[in-house]
Image (tube, rainbow, N blue to C red):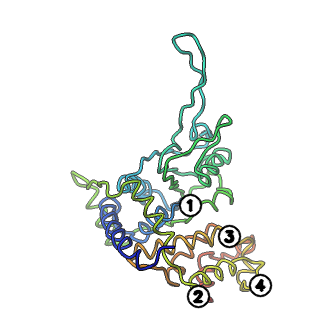
Amino acid sequence: MTEPENLVPEIEALGQKLSEAKAMIGRRFIGQTRVVDLCFATLLSGGHGVLVGLPGLGKTRLVAALSTVMGLSSNRVQFTPDLMPADILGSEVLEENADGKRAFRFIEGPVFCQLLMADEINRASPRTQSALLQAMQEKVVSIAAAERPLGTPFHVLATQNPIEQEGTYPLPEAQLDRFLVQINVDYPDRATERDIILATTGVEEAEVEQVFEAEELLAAQALLRRMPMGDGVVDMILDLVRACRPDDDTASDDIRNNVSWGPGPRAAQALMLTVRAQALIDGRFSPNKDDVAAMAVPVLSHRMGLSFGAKARGVDLVELIEQTVRDL
């Protein structure tokens, strides 16, 4: 295993590159640095993210800027109720050549890219949503008895509208669990909103330029997994995940009384990766317990479910997670 001191030059170089990339993103997606950091953490960790926010907050704009800055080939799919799995994955067509011979040819769907933007993912039917399950987990798709590899790297950044529920389908828990983080996009503050309207209503808008190559992102993902992790941080991750399970001995009364199902081992894996990414983004060489606290809500909130009674009482899941962190 690489000694920690040998990683210092690589981490410093990556930190400078990340700072340049964040500044470039800031030209198109103004403010909301926490949202941008979580997107970078998702890509550095090699995972997928779902951005949840009201219409018009710049979610699609952010994902488009990310694909350019990170040097990733990207496709966008607008999810609608009539969208079919083949519209995402692709399909085989029967073709006849000049000699009159017929053969099937596979036409790739938009999933064959490095960054797939799944816009308003909850508008598609469960059948169509399930088309992404294998792609997100194994980074291949099985079509016509053949496994076809996707882009390297491969990431899905989905968007979701939390208030307009007519004609939508809730994402199944199995698919939610495959998203590394849930990124909540809120209203900008007054100063940021002022900057936004001034920057986007003039004659020209700022353009973004490529900072990373796809190979550099792959190298960054490999570097992240080599970063040292203290035993105390690992123990806190385990303590937190297990304390959020209502049937665990360490769960608080609030968790037992309000949570119907808690996070599985994938949540602990996600925390192990994202806390390292947070340290990288902040220019540090290893994560600490504050990073675990910062990543708790994005990693756990979509992997837990409130009971019917808790929903009726208006219990806030985010507050439950934050309280569990404070109790550790």
The span from disc 1 to disc 2 (Cα, nearest Å) is 27 Å
Q: Amino acid at mark 2?
A: Arg
**Secondary structure under badge 1?**
loop
Residue 284 location (% of width, % of height): 40, 79
Is residue 5 found left or right of 310 in the rendered image? left
Marks 4 & 1, CB-CB < 8 Å contact: no
The residue beneath circle 2 is 326
Mark 2, other Cα within 10 Å: few <14 / some 14–19 / many ≥20? few
Q: Are the residues flagged by discs 3 and 1 in contact, CB closer than 8 Å?
A: no
Q: Secondary structure at mark 4?
A: loop
Q: CA distance from mark 3 to mark 1?
A: 26 Å
Q: Which label is found at residue 162? A: 1
Q: Amino acid at mark 4?
A: Asp
Q: Residue at x 29, y 56 (%)?
A: 200
Which is more foreground, mark 3 or mark 1?
A: 3
- Residue shown at 30% from the left, 65% from the top: 20
Pointer 2 with pointer 3, Cβ within 8 A: no
Q: Earlier in the sequence, mark 2 or mark 3?
A: 3
Task: List the residue tagged with mark 3.
Answer: 265
- Nearer to us of marks 3 and 4 is 3
Q: Earlier in the sequence, mark 3 or mark 1?
A: 1
Q: Amino acid at mark 1?
A: Pro
Query: For mark 4, what is the residue?
Result: 249
Q: Earlier in the sequence, mark 2 or mark 4?
A: 4
- Mark 2, secondary structure of its residue: helix
